[in-house]
Image: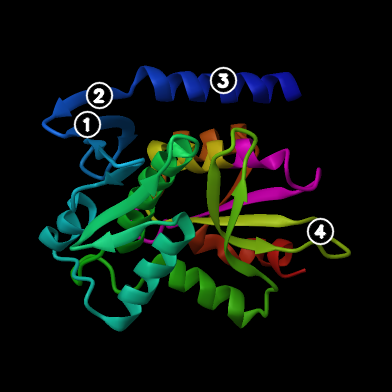
Amino acid sequence: MIHEIQDLLDQYLRWLKDKTVLRQIKDWVEITTPYIDRHNDYLQIYVKKDSSEFVLTDDGYTIGDLRQSGCELESKKRKELLMLTLNGFGVNVENDALVIHASVDNFSLRKHNLVQAMLAVNDLFYLSVPMVTSLFLEDVTSWLNVYDVRYTPRVKFTGKTGYDHMFDFVIPASRRYPERILQTINRPNRNTAERFAFSWIDTKDVRPANSLAYAFLNDSDHTPISTVVDALKNYGVKPLLWTKREEFKEELVA
């Protein structure tokens, strides 16, 4: 089993390297990553050397794209959730641009954190009044609170590769169940499913041996395609459909 997981990690790292493209733009280097946004466009970040450190930024793309789609971030609740998400990755906001600073030693980690922050913000805030009335993460949080589930929100673990991974909830072990890591996926698709799956694969060896991973899939408007559900199962993640959440209550509450 350990060799199979190592092969998956090696494939993931090769995929990251092979699908990353660099382009010089004056003082900046544009990095096109293999990660895809909701428009099916590859995410791009920009890097510049500033004295002895590097500045990495999305050049305002993430927040700007949300604003253009009708999702404003002016309310107190959304601002708080935005900062909570970004703080978990060590990313700042400067004039709507997501920014992080890196040294030679931690460049790969900081680049990874910026890209993950872009994806996380996009997933959290892909909202406009005609489409969604509440944040899926808030819905899951409220449901857990109704049943007094003991959890720690927004927990970051460092995986075998040295990359940090943020998880929405960690439910500690009980007498009946081991530690449970729970992630909400607002838009279940191949990209979001594989991202969580690889985060879990990279992290599981540094967690207790019997830890379990769950993914809450928002199926309120659209039923996730079977390949997404199957992909999660193949990577050892148990998918939970939001509309059938009562069926899995015991596994999370106990």
**Marked residue nearer the N-terminal end (1 or 3):** 3
Which residue, given by chain and number where applicable, does mark 2 sit on?
Answer: 22
**Marked residue nearer the N-terminal end (3 or 2):** 3
**Marked residue nearer the N-terminal end (2 or 1):** 2
For the magenta stretch, what is the residue range?
200-222
Inter-mark Cα distance, 1 to 3: 26 Å
Inter-mark Cα distance, 3 to 4: 31 Å
Q: Name which residue lies at 65% across and 49% down.
A: 213
Mark 3 and mark 2 residues within 8 Å of each other at the beta carbon: no
Q: Is residue 99 left or right of residue 238?
A: left
**Marked residue nearer the N-terminal end (3 or 4):** 3
Closer to viewer: mark 2 or mark 1: 1
Q: Name which residue lies at 54% across and 40% down.
A: 163
Q: Secondary structure at mark 1?
A: strand
The magenta stretch spans residue 129: no
Q: Secondary structure at mark 4?
A: loop
- Three-letter residue code for mark 3: Asp
- Three-letter residue code for mark 4: Tyr
Closer to viewer: mark 4 or mark 2: 2
Binning the other alpha carbons within 10 Å of mark 1 as few (below 14), some (14 to 19) or many (20 upward) gives: some
Closer to viewer: mark 1 or mark 3: 1
Whole-percent x, y for residue 4 in the image? 68, 20
Residue 10 marker: 3
Q: Is residue 177 left or right of residue 200?
A: right
Q: Secondary structure at mark 2?
A: strand
Q: Name which residue lies at 46% across and 72% down.
A: 139
Inter-mark Cα distance, 4 to 2: 46 Å
- Three-letter residue code for mark 1: Val
Binning the other alpha carbons within 10 Å of mark 2 as few (below 14), some (14 to 19) or many (20 upward) gives: few
Inter-mark Cα distance, 2 to 1: 7 Å
Question: Which quarter of the image is occupied by the N terminus?
Answer: top right
